[in-house]
Image (spheres, grey):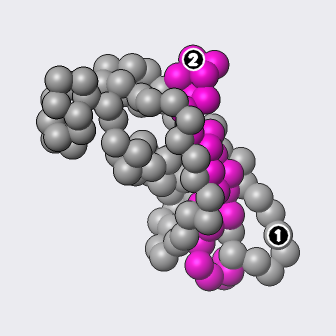
Amino acid sequence: MNFVIEADHPALPGHFPGRPVVPGVVVLDRVLAAIEAGHGPLGAMRLPQVKFVQPLLPGEAARIEIDAVAAEGAAPRWRFRVLRGETVIATGDVQATEPAA
């Protein structure tokens, strides 16, 4: 999934004045939307590991790569990477809090 956060996004004015950076929570919102687009609503979840390694600036194109991690009888889990070109911006895991039905 590709995305761009435009310069007029409401989260940008305070993050940071004069040198806006896309907040991590906005990036994570796009990650969760990408998972839900492929796997349906997540419901309650946790993010046991997330690492932001590079900033994303307004207007920059980024893409999300998601890999489902299968574990018999366990709650669904996905690993993700967010990239700007070939540069990794963020990595992490998203896990549903209940096993799949």
Magenta stretch bounds: 77-101
Q: Is residue 25 left or right of residue 63?
A: left
Q: Which residue is mark 1?
A: 71
Kindly state the secondary structure of the residue where label 2 is placed: loop
Residue 51 location in percent, x, y? 58, 47
User: Please, which residue is most extreme toward the right here?
Assistant: 72
The quadrant in which residue 66 appears is top right
- Residue 80 part of the magenta segment: yes
- The residue located at (61%, 29%) in the rendering is 88
Residue 44 location in percent, x, y? 48, 76
For the residue marked with disc 1, what is the amino acid? Ala
For the question of whether residue 9 can be seen, the reply is no
For the residue marked with disc 2, what is the amino acid? Gly
- The residues tagged by marks 2 and 1 sit, at their Cα atoms, a distance apart of 31 Å
Q: Is residue 64 left or right of residue 55?
A: right
- Neighbourhood count class around disc 1 (C-alpha, 10 Å): few under 14, some 14–19, many 20 upward: few
Nearest the eye: 63 or 14: 14
Residue 85, disc: 2
Which SS does the magenta portion mostly show? Answer: strand
Residues at discs 2 and 1 in contact (Cβ within 8 Å): no
- The residue located at (30%, 25%) in the rendering is 58
Residue 28 location in percent, x, y? 45, 49
- The residue located at (60%, 22%) in the rendering is 87
- The residue located at (68%, 51%) in the rendering is 79
Nearest the eye: 85 or 2: 85
Compare marks 2 and 1 and give the one earlier in the sequence.
1
Residue 74 location in percent, x, y? 76, 77
